[in-house]
Image (cartoon, rainbow, N blue to C red):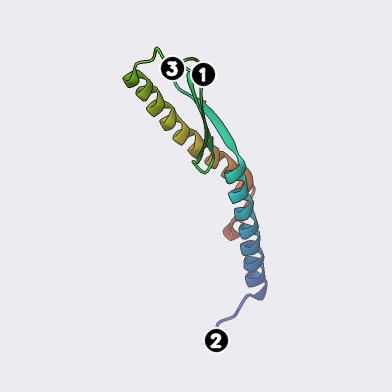
Amino acid sequence: MAREIDEAWIDEAIDRYRHVEILRAELDRAIAAHTVSVYSPDRSIEVVVTAAGDIVDVRIHGVLRHREPTEFAREIRAVVTSATEAARWAREKLQAEVFGSFRSLEDR
């Protein structure tokens, strides 16, 4: 028994695939370009991170000469952990913005 081919469905699937590829490229560009600043709990260290998770800048606010090394290390760990979480949050938000209105073929 021969199987019928739904040419319209195939054409729509190809168009949707191309559209997904365009949206994915847009998302990749947005993730690479979007930055988030996070601060250590005492606000003495600022880390700027992209949504991709790349640390692009670290800024120290205030003087360091009176800081205990263990305290400073603890603040650095805290802000890097926060930067990782902020990058994940930013990626999810950008993905929702880019793909939010996208519907699957089954929804049609």
Residue type at mark 1 is: His
**In this view, which residue lies farthest toward the front?**
65
Q: Residues within 10 Å of mark 1 (few under 14, many from 20)?
A: few
The residue located at (38%, 21%) in the rendering is 72
Residue 6 in percent (x, y) is at 63, 75
Question: Which numbered circle lies on residue 64?
Answer: 3
Q: Earlier in the sequence, mark 3 or mark 2?
A: 2
Asked which secondary structure carries label 1, the reply is loop
- Real-space Cα distance between discs 3 and 2? 78 Å
User: Image quadrant of residue 41?
Assistant: top left
The residue located at (58%, 57%) in the rendering is 104
Q: Are marks 1 and 2 in contact (CB under 8 Å)?
A: no
Asked which secondary structure carries label 3, the reply is loop
**In this view, which residue lies farthest toward the top?**
66
Q: Quadrant of the C terminus?
A: bottom right
Question: In the picture shown, does residue 102 fall above or below 53?
Answer: below
Question: In the picture shown, does residue 83 fall above or below 9?
Answer: above
Question: In the picture shown, does residue 69 fall above or below 31?
Answer: above
Residue closer to the observer: 12 or 45: 45
- Real-space Cα distance between discs 3 and 1? 9 Å
Residue closer to the observer: 47 or 69: 69
Residue type at mark 3 is: Leu
User: Image quadrant of residue 32?
Assistant: top right
Task: Name the residue tied to disc 2.
Answer: 2
Task: Name the residue tied to disc 1.
Answer: 61
